Image (cartoon, grey):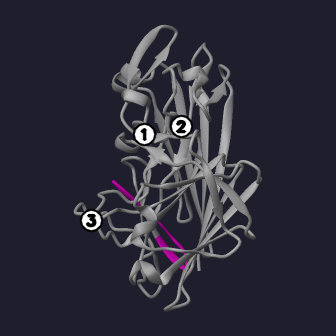
Amino acid sequence: MLVKLENEELTVLLNTKGAELTSVKDNKEHEYIWQADSKFWGRHAPVLFPIVGRLKDDFYLLHGNKYSMGQHGFARDNEFEALEKNDNSVLFELSENDETMSMYPYKFSLKIKYTLSNKTLSVDYIVKNNDTKLMYYSIGAHPAFNLSYNMENYKITINDGGSYKHIPLNKSLSDFEDTDELNANEPIRLNREFFKDDAKIIDTSDNSINSFVLSNDKDDYKIKVNAFNCKYTGIWSTYPKDGSFVCIEPWWGIADTTSHNHEINTKVGINELMPTKSNDYKLNIEFI
């Protein structure tokens, strides 16, 4: 089911399946969000939970038990309940069910609140441990933004510049033994070859706020993603397919490392949550 938020500037559509952002249009009908053409990539902006990226061999170990889970977890494929709704905000919630318990043996609550104000959509993720044992999890965003022109016309500006540790992917796993530096002192010019080796993942843990501005040479449309205390950020598009989108993905977690021993408690970037406790994660997207 689609849920609509709107004001004088923007109309936003969200799907209760996955609590996924599916459309953002301005009053000139300009669409900012990728429209999920399955020839290239059939999603818009999936929520990544309770893992980000891929598990090594698609399984993890917890207290001696083996659990299998696909890339990015199960939240994106589950139906959320819309708890509260008005013209400018909606609160979704996902809790455990029989299927999730077979993959992830926790009672939990994942609430996601979207709030529209002027040209900004704020997103709040609230993770709560409703179980009696320590809970391990990751969470992340994966919004895909429409490209109206050839990719070569676009650039991404990261914060006020600087150099960031780049963690390459090796068969979808994080290769911390082959890191290098991504120089962002100048805006990063995009092209298809930029994604030849999959997503560009950078360590953004040193900053309390990370800002990414997607702009182009042809018009004044811009998108600014502001993420708060995110550990890593992925930048991704299709290769070699010529998908007309780019994803800017704030993550509080990361794919398993190439040398991981499958134990979830030793997973790089994993978060811990005590019983009855909750953690909040925030980002906002400015559609300029």
**Predominant secondary structure, magenta span:** strand
Residue at 58% in and 40% down: 176
Q: Which residue is mark 3?
A: 37
Please state the horizontal and vertical placement of residue 131, each as a whole percent of the image. Answer: 57, 18
Mark pair 2, 3: CA separation: 28 Å
Please state the horizontal and vertical placement of residue 135, each as a whole percent of the image. Answer: 59, 22
| The quarter of the displayed image where residue 158 is located | bottom right
Residue extending furthest toward the left = 39
Give, as a three-letter code, the residue at label 3.
Asp
Compared across the picture, whether 76 is left or right of 36 comes to right
At label 1, counting other C-alpha atoms closer than 10 Å, the crowd grade (few under 14, some 14-19, many 20 or more) is many
77 or 220, which is in the foreground?
220
Mark pair 1, 2: CA separation: 9 Å
Marks 1/2 in contact by CB < 8 Å: the verdict is yes
273 or 88, which is in the foreground?
273
At label 2, counting other C-alpha atoms closer than 10 Å, the crowd grade (few under 14, some 14-19, many 20 or more) is many
Specify whether residue 229 is painted magenta. no
Give, as a three-letter code, the residue at label 1.
Ala
Q: Which residue is mark 1?
A: 75
Q: Which residue is mark 2?
A: 110
Residue 215: tell me if it is visible.
yes
Nearest to the eye among marks 3 and 1: give it: 3
Give, as a three-letter code, the residue at label 2.
Leu
